[in-house]
Image (spheres, rainbow, N blue to C red):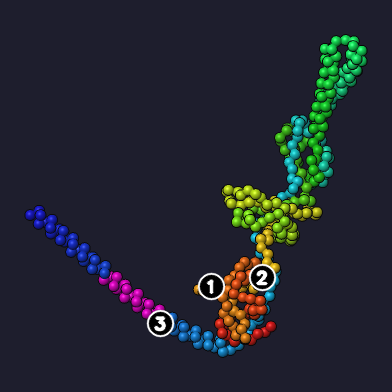
Amino acid sequence: MKKLIKLFCIASILVVSCGETELNLEEKKTQLKELKSQLTDIKSQIKELQNELNGQLVDTKQKKVPVRIKELEEELFYHFIEQTGKINSNENVVVSAEMAGLITHLDVKEGQWVNKGSSIIKLDSEIMKSNVEELITALEFAETTFERQKVLWDKKIGSEIQYLQIKNQYESLQKKLETAENQLKKLTIKAPINGVIEEIFLNQGEFANPGRPAFRMVNPKNVYVEAEVAERYANILKVNTPVKVNFKTLGIDKEAPLSFVGQVINPENGTFKIKINLENPNGFLKPNGMASLEIQDYINENALVVPSQIVKKDMQGDYLFVNKNGQAEKTYIEVGLSQGNKSMIKSGLKIGDEVIIEGYSEIIGGSLLDIKN
């Protein structure tokens, strides 16, 4: 009895499965029928549109379309890499004290121009001056003693040890005085470059320590623009490559060559550094300001060039229209580099071809042309 029940269950499952398969097949057949019906409708609509367009195209070919043409000739073509850069100063230094001490004098103000070697900050030097004076007195006495002892030694009077001790003391005091005088000089912090005092970090009465920034100086007359360029240009850009530099916010344009091309690729972003040195006599270019760069990476003195907007594209590729005996001829071309609104043509055109540069959107291949040039 149990075996019969099992057989009955299996048979029921098979019947249901077959029923579901038949149902899926029916659904697919219905779906296919609907799609075929839609395809028929679409084909019908396409045919109607083609008929309408053919009527319009015949009309376009029959009437002359006003156009302007350009006769191709070889011309100079440049291509530029566009990049953003930042202004920096070749001389932008932060100065710290070399000796610890109390600030007794600030000799300048922020924004003031100073020359290299000018006194900027003076530290308390009274103790050091006293040390120097004491060493000078001691050295004078040691020098007198040494000279007397030397006279005696030359006459073979006195012991060699005594002579060497006095000589050593004299030379030691000379070195100590030299060191003390150098330390005294360091208590006056001087300008290391010609430039403007951009910022003073310490006030009179504060204590200066070695390594603690005291002031910043910038020479605004000589600046450079630095940018990072993609690795793919590494074999193109070289020192002296021409660059156009535009400072949009200032309304300033400059042209200068690349002064530095980095030799190391940044592994984090795949770029290398470039620099352009610029003169800045009026100081209008400020460090950390932004600049737009056009870096020349290609030049062709014998290029065939057309306006970029006249180039169209279809399934076969890029094309434009050329005047052939008063009719428009659809001509497929290979476009090279583009710069601004100009495109260089690599193939498909030759010198003397008359490309249609105005009215091109109103014509098709075979259209009659009314040339307005």
Of the image marks 1 and 3, the number of the one nearer the N terminus: 3
Say which mark, if any, is on residue 33: none
Bounds of the magenta segment = 26-45
Q: Residue furthest left?
A: 1
Say which mark, if any, is on residue 317: 1
State the residue position of label 2: 303
The residue closer to the viewer here, 103 or 155, is 155
Say which mark, if any, is on residue 44: 3
The residue closer to the viewer here, 224 or 5, is 224
Which residue is at 61% across, 75% downward? 349
Mark whose residue sits in front, 2 or 1: 2
Q: Was residue 115 drawn as part of the magenta stretch in this picture? A: no
In this rendering, is residue 144 above or below 275?
A: above
For mark 2, give the secondary structure: strand
Q: Main secondary structure of the magenta part?
A: helix
For mark 3, give the secondary structure: helix
The reply to whether residue 222 is visible in this rendering is: yes
Which residue is at 46% across, 85% downward? 51
Of the image marks 3 and 2, the number of the one nearer the N terminus: 3
Mark whose residue sits in front, 1 or 3: 1
Residue 116 lies left or right of residue 1; in this view the side is right
- Would you identify the image quadrant in which residue 74 lies? bottom right
The reply to whether residue 198 is visible in this rendering is: no
Residues at circles 3 and 2 in contact by the CB criterion of under 8 Å: no
Q: x, y (%) of residue 253?
A: 74, 61
Which residue is at 74% across, 53% downward? 277
